[in-house]
């Protein structure tokens, strides 16, 4: 619909989306400490955009502002709000099926790997006056929202493919409808703004860390990486790692192939460069060492230590530093059990 010859974001006959009661708005926002003034401002923004906060089409979010040293309010549109704005243009003709890919770049229509998040997702938008759908790609390492210790927040850990494809869809909708959605972002897109080191320029990030954060990483997160391994994991490393295959039988083909692919950069051990082969060996050896503690300290204590770090199995541990920390705890538990006897 057009008003005075200009495409309107909200048709003139659409009633304002602001709830009649400030109490209803408080329930919709559900942010402790939100002031009435902030809520009224949010309500007017929602009304101007023709979006209903009670339907979760638009959100008010409070985030820590490091420059102001206090929390500030921002307004973010949900993916349903994006779709509603696109549909009001009269030119939105739907989408292509969503797709995901791993580090191999092969696109698929469903992501079934429960040990790894997808490396990227893409979505395409059909618009009436476009010949072809307009696509957008979102990479996991660029959008995953992390906690202070650089683990994915619960939603990204539980549903990484769903979160990522919403970012891709929002990107594609914004490209297809720039006049209506320019400068508007979803919560899934903006979650990464609060990530640790978000205000550090790329030039100050060590090369090893940049490399780790530009790949899909091993499950379940994008993690920090160090060139030098912790002392606990340096012992016993062969001078020349010519054959990694014995680990496949002990640790299982799935984890073995995953480490070869993501740490070694190859599908077969004979094709892994020497330095990367040594690093693969460290991961395999560390995983094996952690597994051996199941019998040494008992399965209950073993599971307790793993779960305290957020893991169910050693195959989920993403970084050599964390292997070392968990090994130290398990050694301490073993020593404590020995002293108690």
Image (cartoon, rainbow, N blue to C red):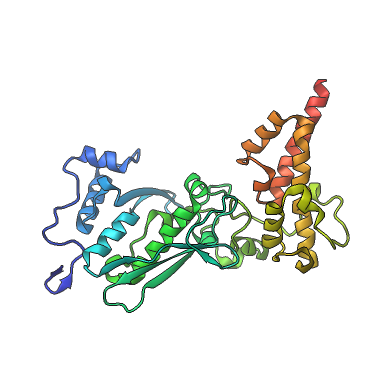
Which quarter of the figure is the N terminus placed in? Answer: bottom left
Q: Which of 142 and 26 is in front in this view?
A: 142
Identify the residue at horizontal 75%, vertical 57% (top origin).
280
Q: Is residue 123 visible?
A: yes
In the image, residue 85 lies at what x, y percent?
26, 61
38 relative to 336, above or below:
below
Residue 35, position as x, y percentages in the image: 29, 42
Residue 9 falls left or right of residue 208: left
Query: Which quarter of the figure is the C terminus placed in?
Result: top right
Q: Nearest the camera: 123 or 245?
A: 245
Total numbered badges shown on the rendered structure: 0
Relative to 285, is 195 on the left or the right? left
146 in relation to 137, above or below:
above
Residue found 71% across the figure and 31% down from its top: 299
Residue 230: tell me if it is visible: no
Q: Residue 186 vs residue 155: left or right?
A: left
Residue 283 pos. (x, y %): 74, 52
* Image position of 250 with respect to 101: above or below: above
Picture quadrant where residue 210 is located = bottom right
250 and 145: which is toward the camera = 250
Seen as rendered, the residue at the extreme bottom is 131
- Choose top left, top right, bottom left or bottom right for residue 213: bottom right
Of residues 164 and 255, the one drawn nearer to the viewer in this rendering: 255
């Amino acid at each position: 619909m057009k008003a005075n010859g200009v495409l309107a974001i909200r048709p003139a006959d659409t009633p304002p989306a602001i709830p009649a009661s400030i109490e209803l708005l408080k329930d919709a926002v559900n942010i402790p400490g939100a002031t009435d003034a902030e809520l009224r401002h949010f309500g007017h923004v929602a009304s101007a955009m023709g979006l209903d906060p009670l339907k979760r089409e638009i959100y008010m979010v409070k985030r820590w502002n490091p420059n102001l040293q206090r929390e500030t309010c921002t307004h973010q549109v949900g993916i349903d709000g994006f779709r509603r704005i696109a549909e009001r243009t009269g030119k939105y003709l739907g989408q292509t099926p969503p797709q995901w890919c791993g580090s191999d770049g092969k696109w698929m229509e469903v992501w079934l790997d429960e040990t790894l998040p997808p490396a990227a997702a893409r979505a395409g938008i059909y618009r009436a006056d476009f010949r072809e759908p307009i696509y957008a790609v979102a990479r996991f390492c660029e959008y995953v929202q992390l906690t202070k210790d650089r683990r994915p927040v619960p939603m990204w850990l539980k549903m990484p493919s769903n979160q990522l494809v919403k970012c891709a869809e929002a990107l594609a909708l914004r490209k297809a409808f720039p006049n209506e959605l320019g400068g508007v972002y979803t919560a899934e897109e903006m979650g990464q703004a609060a990530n640790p080191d978000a205000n550090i320029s790329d030039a100050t990030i060590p090369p090893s860390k940049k490399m780790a954060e530009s790949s899909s990483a091993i499950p379940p997160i994008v993690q920090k990486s160090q060139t030098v391994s912790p002392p606990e994991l340096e012992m016993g490393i062969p001078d020349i790692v010519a054959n990694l295959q014995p680990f496949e039988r002990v640790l299982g083909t799935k984890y073995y192939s995953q480490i070869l692919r993501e740490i070694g950069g190859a599908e077969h051990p004979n094709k892994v460069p020497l330095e990367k082969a040594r690093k693969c060996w460290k991961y395999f050896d560390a995983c094996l060492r952690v597994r051996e503690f199941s019998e040494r300290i008992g399965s209950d204590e073993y599971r307790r230590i793993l779960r305290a770090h957020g893991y169910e199995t050693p195959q989920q541990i993403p970084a050599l530093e964390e292997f070392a920390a968990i090994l130290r705890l398990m050694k301490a538990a073993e020593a404590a059990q020995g002293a108690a006897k």
